[in-house]
Image (cartoon, helix red, strand yellow):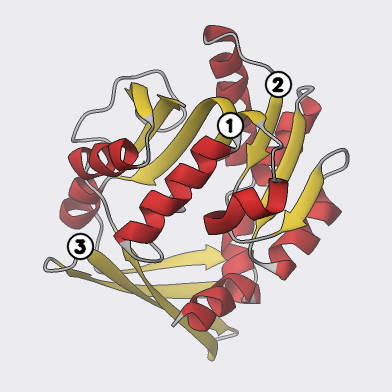
Amino acid sequence: METEKKLVFESDFYIKQIMKLWDEGEKWASWISEVTSKYSTGKRILDVPCGIGRISHFLVKKGFNVVGVDISEKMIKAAEENTQGATFKIGDMRYLEDIFKDEKFDITININNSLGYYEEEDDVKILNQLKKVSKSLVIINLDNRDYTIYNKPNEYYTYAPPYLVLSRETFDPTTSRLMVRRTYFMNDKEIGKIEYSQRLYSLHEVLSILKKAGLKPIEIVAGHSWKGFTIEDSEMTIISKV
């Protein structure tokens, strides 16, 4: 099971889809810069999982000292190719203390719906690890379960050059997990598939696991905005004190 999850993140198909989100990295970097001003923190940031470096790249451009961690060797390779001036490490975010020992960051960020791939107790462990390597703030960003199950279609097409992607998604209300199956086409021919499941969270559930991890939420907004989060928003971003 765990090996299967890692293989998804090593997939060239998955990486192509993440590349589509590259420009979002600049918006996140601008918002994070505002966070550091609002809460008077330092500018040393841990980006985990950092993926292809789409946020790290723009944080470096804004003068941040950035370290990125990701479990995928291919993601880290892409991040190093995409970003100059940051440090990238291959690692599992459930074991950040093993990677950094007593090293701490001003802010740790966990962006783009990066929890829920394991079990809830793993997510608590991840949040606790984010807390332990942070001196000031932990920021997490997740899709809103309630918005997703009522607004997102079960089947849809997207384009991740050079692939046309057919996504089929099934939600299991007994586990709150979304099963995602993606089929990739090029020149009208099917060339590959990936599938994975992910636990989706409602806000009250996120607040519960944050409390278990010893984190103290101080602000909840929609995405990379300063709009207060509501049930109608597709994403929730929670700023917590350690």
Residue pictured at 68% horizontal, 17% vertical: 42
Task: Report the number of discs.
Answer: 3
Disc 1 packing (10 Å; few <14; some 14–19; many ≥20) = many
Q: Earlier in the sequence, mark 1 or mark 3?
A: 1
**Relative to 171, does residue 57 appear above or below in the rendering?**
above
Closer to us: 74 or 100: 100
Would you say 175 lies left or right of 88 here? left
- Can the viewer see residue 45? yes
- Name, please, the residue furthest toward the front: 102
Closer to us: 158 or 68: 68
Whole-percent x, y for residue 200 in the image? 28, 56
Which amino acid type is marked by label 2? Lys
Q: Quadrant of residue 213?
A: top left
- Can the viewer see residue 110? no
Q: Quadrant of residue 230?
A: top left
Residue pictured at 72% horizontal, 27% vertical: 44
Closer to us: 72 or 221: 72
Which amino acid type is marked by label 3? Ser
Circle 1 SS class: strand
Disc 2 packing (10 Å; few <14; some 14–19; many ≥20) = many
Q: Earlier in the sequence, mark 3 or mark 2?
A: 2
Circle 3 SS class: loop
Residues under labels 1 and 3: Cα distance?
29 Å
Q: Give residue 176's mark.
A: 3
Whole-percent x, y for residue 171 in the image? 20, 68
Whole-percent x, y for residue 214 in the image? 37, 35
- Name, please, the residue furthest toward the right: 84
Mark 1 lies on residue: 134
Which amino acid type is marked by label 1? Ser
> From the image, which quarter does the N terminus lie in?
bottom left
Mark 2 lies on residue: 43
Residues under labels 1 and 2: Cα distance?
12 Å
